[in-house]
Image (tube, rainbow, N blue to C red):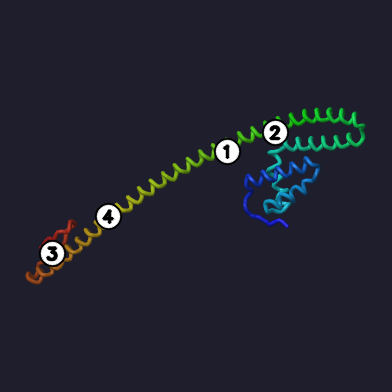
Protein backbone atom coordinates (compact mmCIF):
# COMPACT_ATOMS: atom_id res chain seq x y z
CA UNK A 1 0.00 0.00 0.00
CA UNK A 2 1.38 3.41 -1.00
CA UNK A 3 2.26 5.85 1.71
CA UNK A 4 0.15 8.95 2.20
CA UNK A 5 2.10 12.15 1.60
CA UNK A 6 0.99 15.63 2.58
CA UNK A 7 3.66 17.63 0.79
CA UNK A 8 3.07 19.49 -2.47
CA UNK A 9 3.51 17.93 -5.90
CA UNK A 10 6.84 18.66 -7.55
CA UNK A 11 7.48 19.01 -11.30
CA UNK A 12 9.26 15.62 -11.19
CA UNK A 13 6.16 14.01 -9.64
CA UNK A 14 3.97 15.46 -12.39
CA UNK A 15 6.38 14.25 -15.07
CA UNK A 16 6.40 10.69 -13.70
CA UNK A 17 2.59 10.76 -13.53
CA UNK A 18 2.36 11.92 -17.15
CA UNK A 19 4.91 9.43 -18.51
CA UNK A 20 3.40 6.40 -16.78
CA UNK A 21 -0.19 7.34 -17.63
CA UNK A 22 0.66 7.92 -21.30
CA UNK A 23 2.47 4.58 -21.44
CA UNK A 24 -0.55 2.76 -20.05
CA UNK A 25 -2.82 4.51 -22.56
CA UNK A 26 -0.47 3.61 -25.38
CA UNK A 27 -0.29 -0.04 -24.31
CA UNK A 28 -4.06 -0.36 -23.92
CA UNK A 29 -4.01 -0.54 -20.13
CA UNK A 30 -6.30 1.41 -17.78
CA UNK A 31 -5.54 4.71 -16.11
CA UNK A 32 -6.33 3.15 -12.74
CA UNK A 33 -3.39 0.77 -13.14
CA UNK A 34 -1.26 3.73 -14.16
CA UNK A 35 -2.23 5.66 -11.02
CA UNK A 36 -1.44 2.61 -8.87
CA UNK A 37 2.02 2.30 -10.44
CA UNK A 38 2.73 6.00 -9.97
CA UNK A 39 1.52 5.84 -6.38
CA UNK A 40 3.98 3.06 -5.60
CA UNK A 41 6.85 4.97 -7.23
CA UNK A 42 6.35 8.34 -5.53
CA UNK A 43 4.69 7.25 -2.29
CA UNK A 44 1.17 8.53 -2.83
CA UNK A 45 -2.27 6.93 -3.03
CA UNK A 46 -3.72 6.01 -6.41
CA UNK A 47 -6.68 8.30 -5.65
CA UNK A 48 -4.32 11.23 -5.11
CA UNK A 49 -2.58 10.45 -8.39
CA UNK A 50 -5.90 10.26 -10.22
CA UNK A 51 -7.07 13.56 -8.78
CA UNK A 52 -3.79 15.24 -9.70
CA UNK A 53 -3.97 13.89 -13.25
CA UNK A 54 -7.54 15.01 -13.89
CA UNK A 55 -7.29 18.39 -12.15
CA UNK A 56 -3.85 19.65 -13.20
CA UNK A 57 -1.61 17.47 -15.33
CA UNK A 58 -3.96 16.18 -18.04
CA UNK A 59 -4.61 19.60 -19.60
CA UNK A 60 -0.88 19.96 -20.37
CA UNK A 61 -0.74 16.68 -22.28
CA UNK A 62 -3.86 16.67 -24.47
CA UNK A 63 -1.85 16.32 -27.69
CA UNK A 64 0.29 13.56 -26.18
CA UNK A 65 -2.86 11.73 -25.04
CA UNK A 66 -4.27 11.82 -28.57
CA UNK A 67 -0.97 10.51 -29.88
CA UNK A 68 -0.95 7.67 -27.35
CA UNK A 69 -4.53 6.74 -28.28
CA UNK A 70 -3.61 6.74 -31.97
CA UNK A 71 -0.67 4.45 -31.27
CA UNK A 72 -2.92 2.14 -29.23
CA UNK A 73 -5.44 2.02 -32.08
CA UNK A 74 -2.66 1.31 -34.53
CA UNK A 75 -1.47 -1.67 -32.49
CA UNK A 76 -4.96 -3.09 -32.26
CA UNK A 77 -5.50 -2.77 -35.98
CA UNK A 78 -2.15 -4.34 -36.78
CA UNK A 79 -2.97 -7.30 -34.57
CA UNK A 80 -6.33 -7.80 -36.28
CA UNK A 81 -4.77 -7.57 -39.72
CA UNK A 82 -2.05 -10.00 -38.80
CA UNK A 83 -4.60 -12.49 -37.49
CA UNK A 84 -7.07 -12.28 -40.41
CA UNK A 85 -4.90 -11.73 -43.48
CA UNK A 86 -2.59 -13.89 -45.61
CA UNK A 87 1.12 -13.32 -45.25
CA UNK A 88 1.48 -11.17 -48.41
CA UNK A 89 -1.76 -9.32 -47.86
CA UNK A 90 -0.82 -8.81 -44.24
CA UNK A 91 2.46 -7.16 -45.24
CA UNK A 92 0.70 -4.76 -47.65
CA UNK A 93 -1.94 -3.92 -45.08
CA UNK A 94 0.75 -3.38 -42.46
CA UNK A 95 2.58 -0.92 -44.72
CA UNK A 96 -0.62 1.04 -45.42
CA UNK A 97 -1.49 1.06 -41.74
CA UNK A 98 1.94 2.27 -40.75
CA UNK A 99 1.74 5.08 -43.33
CA UNK A 100 -1.60 6.27 -41.92
CA UNK A 101 -0.32 5.95 -38.37
CA UNK A 102 2.80 7.98 -39.26
CA UNK A 103 0.57 10.73 -40.62
CA UNK A 104 -1.52 10.75 -37.46
CA UNK A 105 1.58 10.70 -35.29
CA UNK A 106 3.16 13.69 -37.06
CA UNK A 107 -0.01 15.77 -36.67
CA UNK A 108 -0.25 14.80 -33.03
CA UNK A 109 3.40 15.67 -32.43
CA UNK A 110 2.95 19.07 -34.09
CA UNK A 111 -0.07 19.80 -31.91
CA UNK A 112 1.82 18.65 -28.85
CA UNK A 113 4.83 20.86 -29.65
CA UNK A 114 2.61 23.87 -30.27
CA UNK A 115 0.82 23.26 -27.00
CA UNK A 116 4.11 22.85 -25.18
CA UNK A 117 5.37 26.09 -26.73
CA UNK A 118 2.33 27.91 -25.36
CA UNK A 119 2.86 26.34 -21.95
CA UNK A 120 6.54 27.33 -22.01
CA UNK A 121 5.64 30.92 -22.90
CA UNK A 122 3.09 31.05 -20.09
CA UNK A 123 5.70 29.77 -17.65
CA UNK A 124 8.10 32.46 -18.88
CA UNK A 125 5.50 35.14 -18.22
CA UNK A 126 4.87 33.76 -14.75
CA UNK A 127 8.60 33.79 -13.99
CA UNK A 128 8.92 37.41 -15.17
CA UNK A 129 5.91 38.42 -13.08
CA UNK A 130 7.38 36.69 -10.02
CA UNK A 131 10.73 38.40 -10.59
CA UNK A 132 8.99 41.77 -10.85
CA UNK A 133 7.01 41.08 -7.69
CA UNK A 134 10.18 40.01 -5.87
CA UNK A 135 11.93 43.21 -6.90
CA UNK A 136 8.99 45.28 -5.66
CA UNK A 137 9.04 43.43 -2.34
CA UNK A 138 12.76 44.02 -1.96
CA UNK A 139 12.30 47.73 -2.69
CA UNK A 140 9.47 47.88 -0.15
CA UNK A 141 11.68 46.18 2.46
CA UNK A 142 14.43 48.75 1.85
CA UNK A 143 11.89 51.57 2.17
CA UNK A 144 10.59 50.17 5.45
CA UNK A 145 14.13 49.79 6.75
CA UNK A 146 14.80 53.46 5.98
CA UNK A 147 11.54 54.54 7.65
CA UNK A 148 12.41 52.44 10.69
CA UNK A 149 15.85 54.05 10.90
CA UNK A 150 14.33 57.55 10.64
CA UNK A 151 11.82 56.73 13.38
CA UNK A 152 14.60 55.37 15.59
CA UNK A 153 16.52 58.64 15.18
CA UNK A 154 13.40 60.66 15.99
CA UNK A 155 12.82 58.61 19.14
CA UNK A 156 16.41 59.17 20.25
CA UNK A 157 16.05 62.91 19.61
CA UNK A 158 12.81 63.06 21.62
CA UNK A 159 14.47 61.17 24.47
CA UNK A 160 17.35 63.65 24.51
CA UNK A 161 14.90 66.59 24.52
CA UNK A 162 12.94 64.96 27.32
CA UNK A 163 16.04 64.54 29.48
CA UNK A 164 17.02 68.17 28.83
CA UNK A 165 13.56 69.48 29.71
CA UNK A 166 13.47 67.27 32.80
CA UNK A 167 16.80 68.61 34.00
CA UNK A 168 15.66 72.21 33.40
CA UNK A 169 12.48 71.51 35.33
CA UNK A 170 14.42 70.12 38.28
CA UNK A 171 16.70 73.14 38.24
CA UNK A 172 13.70 75.49 38.21
CA UNK A 173 12.17 73.65 41.18
CA UNK A 174 15.40 74.10 43.11
CA UNK A 175 15.49 77.83 42.32
CA UNK A 176 11.90 78.26 43.42
CA UNK A 177 12.58 76.34 46.61
CA UNK A 178 15.56 78.54 47.45
CA UNK A 179 13.51 81.64 46.71
CA UNK A 180 10.74 80.44 48.99
CA UNK A 181 13.19 79.79 51.81
CA UNK A 182 14.77 83.22 51.29
CA UNK A 183 11.40 84.88 51.45
CA UNK A 184 10.61 83.14 54.71
CA UNK A 185 13.91 84.28 56.23
CA UNK A 186 13.32 87.87 55.22
CA UNK A 187 9.84 87.76 56.72
CA UNK A 188 11.39 86.67 60.03
CA UNK A 189 13.98 89.48 59.96
CA UNK A 190 11.58 92.26 58.94
CA UNK A 191 8.14 91.72 60.39
CA UNK A 192 5.33 93.17 58.42
CA UNK A 193 7.08 92.74 55.04
CA UNK A 194 5.83 90.11 52.65
CA UNK A 195 6.96 88.96 49.25
CA UNK A 196 5.31 87.32 46.32
CA UNK A 197 6.47 85.77 43.09
CA UNK A 198 5.48 87.42 39.80
CA UNK A 199 4.61 85.64 36.55
CA UNK A 200 8.27 85.48 35.55
CA UNK A 201 9.33 83.78 38.77
CA UNK A 202 10.90 86.90 40.35
CA UNK A 203 10.28 87.88 43.95
CA UNK A 204 8.79 91.27 44.64
CA UNK A 205 7.99 92.98 47.95
CA UNK A 206 4.37 93.51 48.82
CA UNK A 207 3.89 96.91 50.49
Residue 75 image position (x, y, % from top left): 82, 37
Q: Nearer the viewer, residue 202 or 114?
A: 114
Q: How far separated are the C-alphas under marks 2 and 1?
A: 21 Å
Under tag 2, what secondary structure? Answer: helix
Residue identified by numbered label 4: 160
Q: Nearer the N terminus, badge 3 or badge 1? A: 1
x, y percentage for residue 166?
25, 59
Q: Which residue is mark 1?
A: 126
Q: For marks 1 and 4, give the one nearer the viewer.
A: 1
Left or right position of 143 against 14: left
Quarter-wise, where is residue 100 in the image? top right
Which circle, 4 or 2, is nearer the viewer?
Answer: 2
The alpha-carbon separation of the residues under discs 3 and 4 comes to 37 Å
Pointer 3 or 2: first along the chain: 2
Per the model, the C-alpha gap separating discs 3 and 2 is 105 Å
Q: Does residue 184 lie above or below 91 as drawn?
A: below
Residue reaching furthest to the left? 190
Q: Which residue is mark 2?
A: 112
Q: Which residue is mark 3?
A: 195
Up-down: is 142 above or below 181? above
Q: Does dot 3 land on a helix, a strand or a loop?
A: strand
Question: Which residue in the rendered view is the most extreme toward the bottom?
Answer: 188
Q: What quarter of the picture does the C terminus occupy?
A: bottom left
Q: Is residue 176 left or right of residue 7?
A: left
Identity of the residue drawn at 28% across and 56% down: 162
**Which secondary structure lies at badge 4?**
helix
* 124 over 202 or under it: above or below: above
The residue carrying pointer 3 sits among few (fewer than 14), some (14 to 19) or many (20 or more) residues within 10 Å by Cα, namely some
The crowd level at tag 1 (other Cα within 10 Å; few <14, some 14-19, many 20+) is few
Would you call the spot at circle 4 few (<14 residues within 10 Å), some (14-19), or many (20 or more)?
few
Amino acid sequence: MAAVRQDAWTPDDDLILAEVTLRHIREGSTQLKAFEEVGERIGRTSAACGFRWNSCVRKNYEAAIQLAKAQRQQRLQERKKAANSLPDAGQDAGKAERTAADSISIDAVIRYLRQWKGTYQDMGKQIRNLQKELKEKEEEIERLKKENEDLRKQVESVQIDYRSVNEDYKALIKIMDRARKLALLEEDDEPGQTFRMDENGNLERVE
